[in-house]
Amino acid sequence: MKEITWDAFAEVELRVGTIVRAEPFPEARKPALKVWADFGPEIGVRKSSAQITAAYAPETLPGRQILAVLNFPPRQIGPFRSEFLLTGFAREDGAVILAVPDLPVPNGARLI
């Protein structure tokens, strides 16, 4: 495992958001959902493409808090511009399970 400095880690904007909308993304090459999350008044709502269809249906996601990386450059995925990276863990079967806070925290809170 490669070690990094605290300064390098501190540059990553890992923040909590609440999913406000999710829908299928049939144009994606790999199965994915379009996800919109509210990161609080300072940041607002951002959108992302997430390959989480093996474990989540779009209608189950609104209201759930997530952990996301906000300071990657936006990425064009087909007709959709992804503005954050939704974080998760891969299960043995390949399904991605969301990384989430254990208890509710304010939208936009930064991982410390």
Image: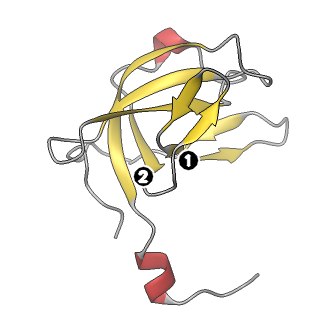
Which of these two is toward me, 98 or 47?
Answer: 47
Residue pointed to by mark 1 = 87
Are there few (<14), some (14-19), or many (20+) residues within 10 Å of tag 2? Answer: many
Q: Quadrant of residue 30?
A: top right
108 lies left or right of 34: left
100 lies left or right of 4: left
Residue at the outermost left position: 41
**Which residue occupies 40% across, 62% down?**
13
> Which mark, by number, is residue 70?
2
Are there few (<14), some (14-19), or many (20+) residues within 10 Å of tag 1? Answer: some
Q: Secondary structure at mark 2?
A: loop
Which of these two is toward me, 26 or 51?
Answer: 26
Where 57 sits versus 37, above or below?
above
Badge 1 or badge 2: first in the primary sequence: 2
State the separation of the CA atoms marked 1 and 2.
Answer: 11 Å
43 lies left or right of 25: left
**Which residue occupies 56% across, 47% down?**
87
Q: Secondary structure at mark 1?
A: loop
Q: How is the image coloured?
A: secondary structure
26 lies left or right of 94: left
Where 71 sits versus 38, above or below?
below
**Which residue occupies 85% across, 35% down?**
93
